[in-house]
Amino acid sequence: MDGAPHRTQDARDLALFDFDGTITTRETFPDFIRHAIPPRRRALGTALFAPLVIGYKLKLVPVHALRAALVRYAFKNVPLAEVEAAGASLAADLLPTLVRPEIQARIDWHRARGDTVVVVSGGFDVYLAPWCRAQGLDWICSSLAAREGVLTGHYAGAQCVADEKARRVRERYDLAGYRAVHAYGDTHEDHALLALADHATWRGAPWHRPAAA
């Protein structure tokens, strides 16, 4: 889901921030799972998903497949309102404690300049949207599919990772309308996002697009 209107007329630059590991000190998807599903179901899931997790760590199972399987197990037939409440709690109580001070300072710097600041993440809008609203930021992220107020156990559309991040940014923002584009990331899933930028930062250091083979 995308959130808040873009503001090309008022902003000098566009600043794109990955969330997990870039803004925060760790991945927040496991925290969301802990907040959103009952302990007994979570404990059973830990045993059921042990082989998939091992496969992921051995690079035999792609991370997007692991995420999709976890979402199906955790959220199929769960009321959307319950998950939204868990997301709001996570955003208010935990996420502020995980934000890197140096990245918060960078976000504040961009906002003070009047830049459009956007969180572009594979995480879910149920917790990223309230956090971004509190910060006064735009957001582009993944969403959970629901039917008549009940989650289906699937993503609503594609996971907002890798090339999908760049595609959604281009779809929503006129990059040529900004004086410069900044992007911040920390994993290979952010490379397509970083490639959009005039000024790209990867794990706190300048990032340069890999040379074509």
Image (tube, rainbow, N blue to C red):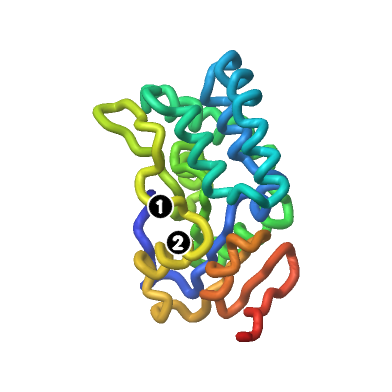
Residue 134 in view in this figure? no
Left or right position of 35 against 21 = left
| Residue in the picture at 48% in, 42% down | 124
Q: Residues within 10 Å of mark 1 (few under 14, many from 20)?
A: few
Question: Can you say which quadrant of the picture contains the C terminus?
Answer: bottom right
Q: Give the residue at x 43% y 65%.
A: 169
Label 2 sits on what residue type?
Glu
Most foreground residue, 110 or 157: 157
Say which residue label 1 marks.
158
Q: What is the quadrant of residue 51 in the picture?
A: top right
First along the sequence among labels 2 and 1:
1
Which of the two residues, 47 or 132, is positioned nearer the viewer here?
Answer: 47
View extreme (left): residue: 148
Mark 2 vs mark 1, CA separation in Å: 7 Å
Q: Which residue is mark 2?
A: 164
Residue 184 visible somewhere in the drawing? yes
Estimate the x, y position of residue 50 in percent, counting from the top left.
67, 31
| Vertical arrangement, residue 158 with respect to residue 202, above or below | above
Relative to residue 49, is residue 9 drawn left or right? left
Residue 1 falls left or right of residue 54: left
